[in-house]
Amino acid sequence: MDFLLMTQPQGQSQNPIVAFLPLILLIVIFYFMLIRPQQKRAKEHRKMLDDLKSGDKVFTIGGVRGTIVAVDDSRIVLRVADNVKISFNKSAIAGQLPDSEEP
């Protein structure tokens, strides 16, 4: 029955770093595959919001397309049709439309 008990010889102990190595490796993989790309996208989105100016064509997270008429620190006014203007929070802007595309 002694052969069933696979223990380490006396005086040798497992290095604690080796025990945590798979967990550390998993955290590193999650950082480079999930967290870092998300932070990069968020940084690009913030830069896009800061660079918005009157005349840019944009779309909102709700799918509304329009041309920017006025820009404030936290507010944007979009012209969505002739004589129709809608005010949005700046954070509601999802992206810019190409200049060739009509809002």
Image (cartoon, rainbow, N blue to C red):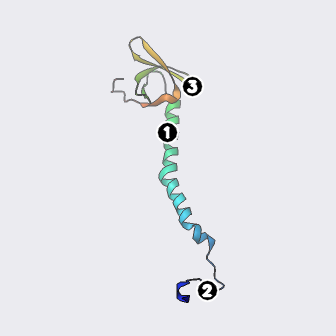
Compare marks 2 and 1 and give the one earlier in the sequence.
2
Secondary structure under tag 2 reads: loop
Which residue bears the numbered disc 2?
A: 9
Residue 86 locus on image (x, y percent): 46, 18
Q: How many marks?
A: 3
Q: Quadrant of residue 81?
A: top left
Q: Earlier in the sequence, mark 3 or mark 2?
A: 2
- Where disc 3 sits, the SS reads loop
Q: Which residue is mark 1?
A: 44
Q: Amino acid at mark 1?
A: Glu
Q: Whole-percent x and y of residue 73?
A: 58, 25
Residue projecting furthest to the front:
1
Q: Judge whether 8 appears above or below 90 on screen.
A: below
- Amino acid under disc 3: Ser
- In the image, residue 97 sits, relative to residue 68, either above or below, namely below
Instruction: Please indicate, yes or no, whether residue 8 appears anywhere in the rendered image.
Output: yes
**Label 2 amino acid?**
Pro
Q: Dot 1, crowdedness within 10 Å: few (<14), some or many (≥20)?
A: few
Identify the mark nearer the N-term, 1 or 3. 1
